[in-house]
Amino acid sequence: MGTVYLARSRGGRAVAVKVARPELASDPSFRARFRAEVAAARQVGGFHTAQVVDADPEAEAPWLATAYIPGPTLSGLVTAEGPMDEKRLRSLGAALAEALEAIHACGLVHRDLKPGNIVMASDGPRVLDFGIARALESTRLTATGSAFGTPGYLAPEQALGEEVTGAADVFALGAVLVAAAGGRPFGEGTPMGLMYRSVHEAPDLRAVPEALRPLVARCLAKDPAERPTPDAIMDELMEGAGAAGAPGAPEVPEVPEVSVVPDPRVAPVVPAAPSVPSVRVTPVAPAPEEGPVDAVPTPADAVPAPAPVPVDAVPHPAPAPVVPHPAPAGRQPAPLSYPPTLYVPPPPLLAPAPAPEFAAADRNSGIAVDGSGVSLHFFGEEADFLWSEIGAVRYDRIRRDRVLRVAVTLYDGSVYDCEVDGRRASRVDEWIRLLDPVLRHYLPA
């Protein structure tokens, strides 16, 4: 939805400030929905969410501040440490069910629960970005009747553009547990393929411990009425916790409300995990302790993210030119650890030079390249790839040189491409003139 800043309140508390992109701020529909969602999200307490502490939906660039939660995302943790066993899955599932129960009690539906939106804090998992998806879904940036969310975690009713209730979050919870166990409930492939299988095919639960499969299967039921409630999920997980040796999730005090005033002296936090399409807050390295500094961004200085446009990611072989990227060393990263006390670094004396970026779009599709990676968009769907997983990016002109095609090759060998219609060969030439140096900046030969 925009740029995320790590900042401090006037009292010195760490917060994550999300400033909406200009095109969202100019949309009355987004402002109305954002206002309603922020009011509801303020009511969400509990132990497993990042609480909203301040917001200004009426600002020139609407912004939202939540408590800052240090820790890796669930997707990052599973990548670093491997799949979870039954004990940890039960604890994770109970904590997420409790978070969903608190969110649903306020009349909210998360709509985009996934491993990248779950931060594994030292005192238990926290759910981020609740209340934001629905505000984004109502804008002109999403076509009427199209799905909003992340393929692979989308409930069938979401994929079909039907009415969405809290049962859709339960479906996503089941998919998250499969992912945390090291599996993929609907396999791999294009967003359209994932959504098709979520609607028509049974999930693959082979990675899930046998004792948990019946519950996860009910969460992933095609009919929303057949899915258990978050309360029932907690009861079932805790009933079997003794046999699995899983303790309940620890409780932490709620974050007190603070006042956040925008200020231009903090650089944006770069998300560490792939996300589609939401923004996540990731921790920064600890710095020497300093006195409280009022360092909250002003929307005027926010670096706007590329305008969201629809995405397609269909495997397709594409010709050169190729901009290679060195393969990773193959060594698994060490598990992330965090100090008991969070220290927020002071703002830099000079603003960093802006990172090069590129964006091209037509009415149906688009391509965006920036410091985080490459995003491909097509008819309301989006696929985001981080530079750490990209092996090469190819581009070429097709259809009498009036269409730009960009193909992303990942280290696992899969290829995703997207085509943008420039209508004129001169426009495609200009796009390539801008794209080539950006790719060479992030993928040096």
Image: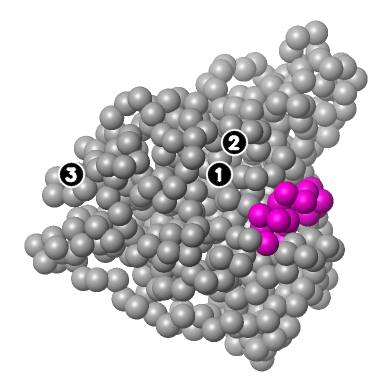
Residue farthest along the top direction in this orientation: 400
Q: Dot 1, how many residues are within 10 Å of its Cα: few (below 14), some (14-19), or many (20+)?
A: many
At label 1, the amino acid type is Val
Q: CA distance from mark 2 to mark 3?
A: 31 Å
Badge number at residue 92: none
In terms of image quadrants, where is residue 123? Answer: bottom left
Q: Circles 1 and 2: CB distance less than 8 Å?
A: yes
Q: How is the image coloured?
A: one colour
> Quick one: label 1 or label 3, which is nearer the N terminus?
3
Badge number at residue 276: 1
Task: Indicate which label's residue lies in the foreground, 1 or 3.
Answer: 3
Read off the magenta span.
18-35
Residue farthest along the left direction in this orientation: 243
Q: Is residue 34 magenta?
A: yes
Q: Position of residue 183 (x, y in %)?
A: 31, 41
Q: CA distance from mark 1 to mark 2?
A: 7 Å
In terms of image quadrants, where is residue 144? Answer: top right
> Quick one: label 2 or label 3, which is nearer the N terminus?
3
